[in-house]
């Protein structure tokens, strides 16, 4: 139910984009968002902020008030696990899993004991020419560094002071 | 290899604690850390900060320089998937999975489109009396609220300015 | 069939809440229940007790007699396994699995050989300020301590006395 | 590591039993425990209580002080998932999964919205004659009925009174 | 197709029971069947025998000839694997998996090399008072003991006598 | 531990067979057992009966008293799940899964609501010539028909008479 | 789509059989096919050969031209993985997995390095009396022996002769 | 045990090849086998035929009598499921799964209702130049076409003539 | 939604082919494409290039403008994981997994550290006569060799020159 | 075996790095490779090219000839599936799976029907300052764009010209 109403919303958003004849890059240019973020918005994987509504409406006048309303609700983020069959998505997963330990160790060396946030996070897809003059796909993952906190009781605001275990 | 050297380290840390005769709560009291964090330190699931070394040494004089050295390296965090068989751990997982959507929706209502961090995060286990006078286990998860960023190109510091796709 | 009629019930309950314009916290305040429990009731993951009906009706006058009837039947508790993809739910699961052994050992030290019940159990989501003045999500799991029974035959009421194996 | 030291302990306990020449039923008779509980004790799946030590020592004089010490530590409960291949264990699982919904509904009808505890729980295996005079295996699961609590804030002892969300 | 026609049949049988206002225990009393078996019949997990038809009809006059016809066909037995999420069913599964090896060994000691049948099998759910006066759920599994046959060629009736490999 | 001692036993039994120079068929002929059962005995997947000991000893004089002792203990039956990769075993599994529903329906038509036992069960592998004169493998599964019991309370010997739920 | 049209076809074929009032065995007798093969044909798991059409039409006059047309198309063979829950099918799978290695080794001893084909394959279900006079289910798997080829280049017809790697 | 002795055999065979300094292609040339088959032989995934022994010995004089003996035993064929992580093997699997239905339909159109055998089967890896002059990997799968048999009782040699079900 | 509209498209393409009465091979001949590629096009697993439109239209005049439009959109490539149950597809998977390591090693020996591309890739199914005069299925996988790049910073066009980490 | 010798090699390479006291970034600077590639080399997930040997030797003089020899063999690429438990690696996987469809669609719009290669591929981890002055982790995936080939028979070099199916 939920699922199918979500699917309906996504299909309508995609139809709106298709009828606009614009690419994700063009909408990105007009709204000042990354191309990946625009695509996420139109697939209900991101949350539309109020101040961005006017720019998005002007880029995609096909969007109705209902669409905008829907896009402003925090989404339930998910994906079909069979996505991994798609060769272009598998290659990304392959890179992450094969390079994962190396990436983690470099983060530890350069930043400390922490991770790259996937929430305070930017992603874009770019097209560059390689040294051989051929097209290359460049995907940038840019996330805030989050250090692990040391769990000191004095810093734990939620802790009830007098009821020690 | 890595795995077994890690297992050796954990066993030695556990032995050090056992021979001290202290509980996690006692060590927590002496170090100012949460009881869960102490347990994580002694299982190599957390990172020992330099300023905490003296307190930990004084609480657990059995720890050698090698132990301290090891505990100060950022750990590779992991768990045995069969942990979920343990009834006390299964109950926690059951609560998370059955209450998960409700928790998410309340976060959205009270905070906005974001999540509770598991990195800037505190956890403690406490013992309280219920209204029927019986013991109750209280587990507190206290994590920083992380709002999803809107991915504006102008805020994406990593983006190469001139090489648009 | 069952599944879809359940989905229908949940959607109607959610619609009733939405049209009331109230948050889970507001309904919690008016009914004296935890915010998580209210959300569970409206997702058919908890059982509505007779004495709470009047308060819930007054908080959500949109609820029909059929809704109330449905909410008073013991639910079949379940969840979509893909929930774990949702970042806010994954973070909770990550904490449980990575901290699980530590939590178990502290329960053993402080209480004995037993577990935290997930049935005689309370859960709430709260908002506090951290020492840095930033918002933090506090999730409290509060369950009765259940000690493992020693299985003495004389205490096993169900055991047929004379027909020894 | 942990795993193999646990396996060693179990093997030694089994050896002690074997060299005693006694069956689980005989030890159960001498200790006043159920036969299943005795078997669990000797496989480190249950916790030996202090007052039972003398009876167990007298039933199994082969047990050393180290064995007793080990059996008095709260165990990490687990099982090999391939156990389910064993036909005698598969049949039990088959019954639980095929009859599960029916059992749940009868509990709801006769007791209310709650479950059978697997912690305050007794289990025994008995041998009876069927109406055709043939041997039958009778397995009894006897667990305390645990009603789901209604999560009223006033009953939630852990809740910080003044810091409402 | 099959699946949905089966689901329809089950829903109608459940409706018939609901409109009768009787519990599984009451129908069990009137038909001489165990309460679990009655519930299985009404979920198409068991086969209705001709001689039981009159008693069932008199207990549930709402049942039509079509229902009776359907219930007399050998069912395709199955279950939704997500049943295991339901806490009351999980607790049963937990008991079976954690106690499985012990149960098997006791069967071997008391009966020999064989298993408990899940086909020539009885199951009931009962309510008893514990020594503390509290309600307890008692689930009884009672299955015929089946010894493994030794595969002697002279006893293998299907074996073609003259065409040795 | 258990696992490796079992593996050792199996290897020794296989060595005994190899040094005898006999095939499973030859040992089957000498002992009166099916060829599959002999192979199961020598892989600790079947239980050696006392009256068969002399025949097996005479067929395989290499077997020591320890081997015989080990073979007379009820085995923990299991298999490596990766066995299904072996093409000869996969083909069997393929046949069972693809023909399964048809086999079940024919059993229902010809026998009633019941199953083929895998415990009171014989299995043999034979070599025959096909109509084209080529070798064919014939695998025979011959199991007792087990009808599902109707669970009448009066036939349930384990049921406590007076303590109705 | 495909899936549901296939399900429709199967249901219609099953209806045709049901309205004929004949068992699989009766149709097998009339068509000269094995009973399992008849059942496979009516579940679209086998391919109807032209010369068998008249016999099948005469055995099941309810079949329409469309049904016959559909049955003469090579099927996409498949099964619902949850079939394995059905006790009668699980028992077969249990036998295959527990006896698999033994069967493989006997094939190797008696035939050589090869397998039993599941394509040039016959299967039937028979009813015989055991030595105790009780009914037994006999399932016969009869497949052509396929030896592994040695991959000699001179025998590899597809190999391009002059373009060696 | 088995597993590790197999691993030892494979390592020794690989060492023999390495110390010969020959590639699989060179050994293939000298023995008349396909390159893939040579590699399978040296990994114990294929069976060495007696008449090929002299050629293999002359190509790899490092092989001892024990090695030859081992290679002449029918292997237990298997693979590590994590092989699929290797990009070169994943690409093959990707092609098979994405093209599978198309390949099946073409086989049906051109050959009939049957399959390509993986037993009477040849495989080779070749290097060719593409139209752009770049190297290409050509993998050839060449298997006997196996038509599904129609299961006529008169052709089923194993069927006991007089004991109809 | 997406999924079902895709299924509809595929069914219509298949219908168009069926009503043309042509085989994949015939359409391949007329369009100059491989037979597998034609089948992939008609199952929306490949992308129709503009210059091929006229040939495909002339081979399959049943195709409408909408069909052509749809076929010219880059497809989301996927497959039903249960495909592997189909014996003809399983045999291919079996070959890939059992021969995978050998194929990889030969690629390394003959080409270097790289893989066979599954993107710049050709596949065809052919029918040849074996040395025994019997039909054989030949499946050719022909992919560009892709060497792993050495990741030199000077060749990484995307790297921001001045902002070293 | 293979596995453990690989683990040994990796540990020795890591030890060599540790005793050098250099970070991955420093070695990257000295060798002209990306930091991720250096880390991959020292974990045997990449292939050392001959021309890079001198630079690597000078950066890590601890490396022996055996190490260099080992690093110049094409590796068997793999990873432990439990890596995904590590929070820093999970976040990457989360981003790939949640953003995957969007990334694919943008590639299709900007490049056509093709993918980003994971073989002709560069990866680096960089540290930048965000607009809020906080550290950010930037991970760059830079892969060659690979368009799907149209499978024209005339371009398929491997195709045998005269033996049409």
Image (cartoon, coloured by chain):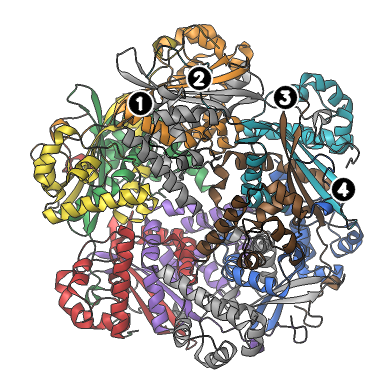
Chain colours: A brown, B blue, D purple, E red, F green, G yellow, H orange, J cyan
Residue that mark 4 sits on: J128
Residue F84 vertical placement versus J68 (above, below)? below
- On the same chain, marks 3 and 4? The answer is yes
Q: Is residue D98 visible?
A: yes
Identify the mark at residue G114; answer none if there is no mark. Answer: 1
Dot 2, crowdedness within 10 Å: few (<14), some or many (≥20)? many
Residue that mark 2 sits on: H36
Q: Secondary structure at mark 4?
A: strand
Q: Secondary structure at mark 1?
A: strand
Label 4 resides on the chain identified as J
Residue that mark 3 sits on: J70
- Count of numbered badges drawn on the protein: 4
Label 2 resides on the chain identified as H
In the foreground, G68 or H16: G68
In the foreground, A102 or H72: A102
Q: In the image, what residue occupies the spot 87% across and 48% down?
A: J128
- As measured in the structure, the alpha-carbon distance from the residue carrying label 3 to the one carrying label 4 is 35 Å
Q: Secondary structure at mark 3?
A: helix
């Amino acid at each position: 139910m939920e699922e199918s109403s979500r699917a309906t919303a996504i299909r309508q958003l995609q139809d709106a984009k298709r009828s606009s004849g614009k690419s994700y890059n063009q909408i990105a240019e007009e709204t000042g968002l990354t191309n990946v973020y625009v695509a996420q918005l139109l697939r209900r994987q991101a949350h539309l902020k109020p101040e961005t509504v006017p720019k998005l409406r002007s880029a995609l006048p096909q969007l109705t008030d209902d669409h905008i309303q829907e896009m402003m609700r925090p989404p339930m983020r998910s994906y079909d696990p069979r996505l991994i069959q798609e060769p272009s998505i598998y290659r990304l997963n392959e890179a992450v899993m094969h390079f994962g330990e190396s990436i983690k160790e470099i983060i530890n060396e350069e930043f400390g004991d922490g991770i790259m946030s996937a929430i305070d996070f930017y992603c874009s897809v770019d097209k560059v020419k390689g040294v051989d003059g051929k097209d290359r796909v460049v995907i940038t993952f840019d996330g805030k560094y989050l250090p692990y906190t040391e769990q000191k009781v004095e810093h734990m605001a939620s802790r009830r002071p007098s009821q020690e275990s």
